[in-house]
Image: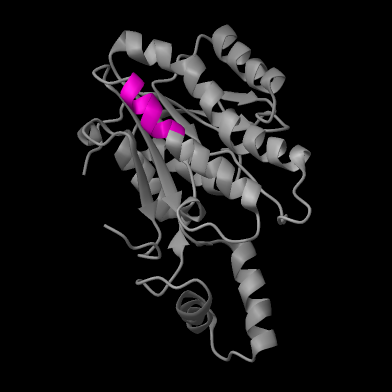
């Protein structure tokens, strides 16, 4: 399928590694020009920016680099976000503010800055990376899940504010993603639990007993990137104001 993204310019935050890198590569294969963002170090790429998205000064530094280079993104992928292990016992006000700056305002403020150009051109795509933990939050990491939940809420509000402009706004919410790090973690857990077998057997047990879903496996980064590329395409112009779960059927409701 041709996604008709040739000539579009996309800014993908946190795209110098991991899932963001795969998203950028996928968009590039579809003909989209990409701006690679590094949180601390400027990536070695034809088009790149650097800046700490966790505060307003860092976000403004990124916007200034875009202005100086004359880059006006048609597509914004707010991939950057992170968390740590915290719970209700140790989540003070500083932790809550940190999680909202990192996972909510990092995305919203860039969207606010970039959608005027999209609106003027009559076309644009804004995609936030969320988590199914916003739908079924655990007892741990409450500030993170609340921040990502706020991002889904803001998605609906901004989509309504931009109705009729040619801009769509969506959140993509992955379930448990298979990465090198998650594989190491679950292999270690499997040894402790006495689970035998190769990785595929371990993965099936994880997705049956610990993080149940219907597919019996974890989501891949490439699957997340492919969904985002589709959502960014002109052929997905009627999909807006949505949080799209890609979780193998982990969260089920009508």
Residue 91 included in the magenta stretch of the image: no
Image x and y of residue 155, in percent: 41, 33
Image x and y of residue 231, in percent: 31, 38
Is 99 on the left or on the right of 28, as rendered?
Answer: right
Residue 155 included in the magenta stretch of the image: yes
Q: Is residue 158 above or below residue 114?
A: below
Q: Is residue 90 in view?
A: yes
**What residue appears at the point 49 percent right and 50 percent down from the top-left corner?**
134
Image x and y of residue 97, in percent: 70, 35
Instruction: Please report the bounds of the magenta region as a residue range.
Output: 154-161
Q: Nearer the viewer, residue 191 or 96?
A: 96
- Of the 4 image quadrants, the one containing the N terminus is top left
**What residue appears at the point 57 percent right and 91 percent down from the top-left corner?**
196
Is 203 on the left or on the right of 171, as rendered?
Answer: right
**What residue appears at the point 37 percent right and 39 percent down from the top-left corner?**
29
Q: Nearer the viewer, residue 102 or 72?
A: 102
Predominant SS along the magenta part? helix
| Residue 94: quadrant of the picture | top right
Image x and y of residue 3, in percent: 25, 37
- Of the 4 image quadrants, the one containing the C terminus is bottom left
Q: How many marks?
A: 0
């Amino acid at each position: 399928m041709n996604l008709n993204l040739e000539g579009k310019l996309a800014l993908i935050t946190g795209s110098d590694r991991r899932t963001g890198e795969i998203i950028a590569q996928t968009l590039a294969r579809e003909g989209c020009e990409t701006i690679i963002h590094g949180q601390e170090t400027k990536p070695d790429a034809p088009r790149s920016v650097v800046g700490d998205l966790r505060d307003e000064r860092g976000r403004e530094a990124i916007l200034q680099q875009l202005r100086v280079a004359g880059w006006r993104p048609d597509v914004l992928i707010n991939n950057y976000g992170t968390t740590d292990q915290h719970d209700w016992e140790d989540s003070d006000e500083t932790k809550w503010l940190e999680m909202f700056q990192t996972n909510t305002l990092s995305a919203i403020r860039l969207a606010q800055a970039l959608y005027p150009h999209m609106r003027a051109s009559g076309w644009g795509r804004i995609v936030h990376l969320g988590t199914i933990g916003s739908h079924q939050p655990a007892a741990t990491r409450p500030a993170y899940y609340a921040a990502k939940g706020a991002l889904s809420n803001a998605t609906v509000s901004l989509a309504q504010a931009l109705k009729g402009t040619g801009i769509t706004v969506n959140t993509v919410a992955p379930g448990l993603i298979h990465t090198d790090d998650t594989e190491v973690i679950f292999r270690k857990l499997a040894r402790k639990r006495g689970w035998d077998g190769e990785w595929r057997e371990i993965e099936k047990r994880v997705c049956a007993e610990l993080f149940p879903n219907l597919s019996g496996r974890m989501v891949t980064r490439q699957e997340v990137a492919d969904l985002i590329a589709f959502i960014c395409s002109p052929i997905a112009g009627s999909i807006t104001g949505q949080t799209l779960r890609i979780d193998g059927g982990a969260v089920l409701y009508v």
